[in-house]
Image: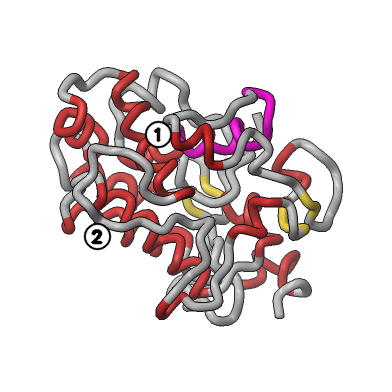
């Protein structure tokens, strides 16, 4: 299946290995046991659902430790003032790559990624009301992608593995994200994880993996999910984004004309 993943995609091979090497058991297994006791595929999926849904819509359930999470659909404040990611999901902008969703075309198109009920089903620990909706496919892809990053031993491995596009640049290139937009995303991931009791050290590990893999312009092909397939991974593509140390901007020529 082609990737419908619009915003939450995670680490390259070295980052994923680093995440798993820091914890035995993996971060996924560790926090599934801490929050839900039994480390089953179903509980791992529940953990991923709680965290991903909170990243999207903010705090909505317990258990959590009282940390406020606005969610990526809320406008940015403070150092992220002016950031507004909601139009990327609502279809207000032509930022979906048709080739990443099995269609043809060389320019971004408008797609409503909130067509499965919006926030309401997410508040009920669901991906969407309609399994055929863009929203449902998006969220379930995200659950599987996070699972692969965090080293879930069952969910995302043998149960419902990620089967989307391995290139997160390809999926996100027409979004043309800058440093503030990408930074806001990472912040919401960190807040969501923290709100469910993930330690500061582990949150830092996840944030570093996100930044190292997706936050630098012109990065060379790398494996992410799956780690065995090297592909372009830069999501932060505007000039405000830091340039990768080992960079090759010629690989990103197809988007340069769109970036201002």
Location of the C terminus by quadrant is bottom right
Q: Secondary structure at mark 2?
A: helix
The reply to whether the magenta stretch includes residue 141 is yes
Residue bearing mark 1: 49
Magenta region: which residues?
131-144
Q: Is residue 226 visible?
A: no
- Residue 145, relative to residue 204: is it above or below? above
Q: Nearer the viewer, residue 134 or 165?
A: 134
Residue at figure coordinates x 58%, y 62% from the top left: 85
Q: CA distance from mark 1 to mark 2?
A: 20 Å
- Residue 260, relative to residue 155: is it above or below? below
Residue bearing mark 2: 204
* Magenta stretch, main secondary structure class: helix
| For residue 154, side relative to residue 36 (left or right) | right
Location of the N terminus by quadrant is top right
Give the quarter of the image for residue 28.
top left
The reply to whether the magenta stretch includes residue 114 is no
| For residue 153, side relative to residue 88 (left or right) | left
The reply to whether callout 1 and callout 2 are in contact (CB within 8 Å) is no
Residue 93 horizontal/vertical position (percent):
74, 60
Residue 78 horizontal/vertical position (percent):
41, 79
């Amino acid at each position: 299946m082609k990737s419908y993943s619009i915003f939450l995609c995670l680490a390259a091979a070295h980052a994923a290995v680093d995440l798993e090497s820091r914890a035995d058991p993996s971060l996924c297994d560790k926090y599934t046991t801490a929050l839900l006791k039994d480390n089953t595929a179903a509980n791992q999926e529940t953990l991923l659902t709680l965290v991903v849904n909170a990243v999207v819509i903010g705090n909505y359930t317990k258990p959590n430790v009282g940390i406020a999470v606005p969610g990526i659909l809320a406008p940015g404040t403070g150092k992220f003032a002016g950031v507004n990611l909601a139009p990327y999901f609502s279809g207000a902008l032509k930022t979906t790559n048709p080739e990443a969703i099995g269609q043809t075309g060389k320019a971004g198109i408008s797609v409503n990624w909130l067509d499965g009920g919006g926030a309401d089903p997410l508040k009920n620990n669901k991906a969407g009301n309609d399994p055929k909706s863009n929203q449902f496919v998006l969220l379930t892809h995200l659950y599987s992608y996070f699972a692969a990053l965090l080293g879930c031993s069952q969910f995302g491995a043998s149960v419902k593995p990620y089967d989307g596009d391995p290139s997160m640049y390809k999926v996100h290139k027409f979004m043309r994200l800058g440093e503030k937009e990408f930074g806001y995303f990472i912040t919401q991931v960190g807040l969501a994880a923290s709100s469910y009791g993930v330690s500061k050290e582990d949150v830092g590990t996840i944030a570093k993996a996100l930044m190292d893999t997706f936050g630098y312009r012109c990065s060379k092909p790398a494996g992410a999910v799956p780690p065995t397939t090297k592909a372009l991974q830069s999501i932060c593509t505007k000039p405000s984004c830091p340039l990768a140390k080992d960079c090759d901007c010629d690989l990103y020529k197809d988007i340069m004309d769109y970036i201002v």
